[in-house]
Image (cartoon, rainbow, N blue to C red):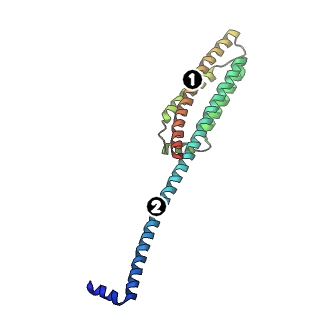
């Protein structure tokens, strides 16, 4: 070691070269480490951004799907309400059948299946919605089975209208239950998004 220091003292050019090379190597290693750390951080941020982009898109598609479904049934309920107030029994079956056809078409040929992506990010219990949908469809079918004919007496028409009104109250209850259940899930999603945005 003493010989090494003696050589460095005698040859200042060698000493300068070794010092410069050492600092260059240290600088290169530090720069490489810093670049690697920054690249990893950027990668993690990109992954996080992509994750939240997908999560928001899934929440949006789910919201569109369920709100469209809820509004379609809500529109049918409103339409039946108006027809019952006006005492129009003939148009009832047509209105109910029209809504059933729209719901069936929408369920068998959805615009997209992207609303299912929500299950990748949130635990949505679709059994609740399935049960409420089934119960609602049973009520709608019961309403559809009530047939008004020209030979019905005024009493028979009134009885059938009262039966439709009773079923409509049940349908409204199921619809409100479905809305509140969906809004509870939507509230959780909004809170999650709000936490991310802050």
Residue 20 sits in quarter: bottom left
The residue shown at (63%, 32%) is: 71
Front residue of this view, candidates 170 and 63: 63
Quadrant, the N terminus:
bottom left
Vertical side of 27 occupied by 102: above or below: above
Percent coordinates x, y for residue 90 in the rendering:
72, 21
Q: Residue furthest left?
A: 2
Residue at 64 percent of width and 25 percent of height: 77
Q: How far apart are marks 2 and 1 (CA)?
A: 53 Å
The part of the image, by quadrant, that contains residue 145 is top right
Considering only order in the chain, which callout, 1 or 2, is on the residue closer to the N terminus? 2
For the residue pair 2 and 140, the one nearer the viewer reads as 2
Q: Name the residue under label 1.
A: 173
User: 30 or 42: nearer the eye?
Assistant: 30
Question: Which of the 4 image quadrants contains residue 23?
Answer: bottom left
- State the residue at coordinates (71%, 23%): 91
Estimate the x, y position of residue 151 in percent, counting from the top left: 71, 13
**Could you say which is closer to the camera, residue 174 or residue 88?**
174
**Residue 150 at x, y percent in the picture:** 73, 16
Give the mark toward the camera: 2 or 1.
2
Task: Specify the farthest residue to the top.
Answer: 155
Residue appearing at x 49%, y 44% in the figure = 121
Q: What element carries label 1?
A: helix
* Relative image position of residue 93 (x, y in whole percent): 67, 24
Secondary structure category for the residue under label 2: helix
Query: Which residue carries the number 2 mark?
Result: 40
Please determine whether, in this image, residue 96 is positioned above or below residue 61: above
Local packing at callout 1 (Cα closer than 10 Å; few below 14, some 14-19, many 20+) is few
Left or right: 94, with 55 as reference point: right
């Amino acid at each position: 070691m003493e010989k090494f220091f003696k050589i460095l003292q005698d040859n200042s050019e060698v000493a300068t070269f070794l010092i410069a090379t050492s600092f260059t190597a240290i600088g290169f290693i530090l720069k490489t480490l810093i670049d690697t750390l920054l690249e990893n951080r950027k990668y993690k941020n990109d992954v996080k951004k992509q994750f939240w982009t997908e999560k928001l898109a899934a929440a949006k598609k789910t919201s569109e799907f369920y709100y469209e479904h809820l509004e379609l049934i809500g529109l049918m309920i409103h339409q039946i309400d108006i027809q019952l107030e006006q005492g129009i029994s003939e148009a009832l079956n047509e209105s109910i059948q029209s809504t059933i056809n729209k719901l069936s078409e929408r369920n068998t040929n959805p615009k997209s299946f992207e609303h299912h992506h929500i299950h990748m990010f949130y635990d949505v219990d679709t059994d609740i919605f399935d049960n409420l949908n089934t119960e609602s469809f049973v009520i709608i079918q019961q309403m559809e089975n009530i047939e008004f004919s020209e030979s019905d007496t005024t009493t028979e028409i009134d009885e059938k209208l009262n039966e439709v009104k009773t079923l409509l109250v049940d349908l409204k209850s199921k619809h409100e239950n479905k809305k509140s259940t969906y809004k509870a899930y939507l509230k959780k999603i909004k809170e999650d998004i709000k936490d991310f945005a802050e």
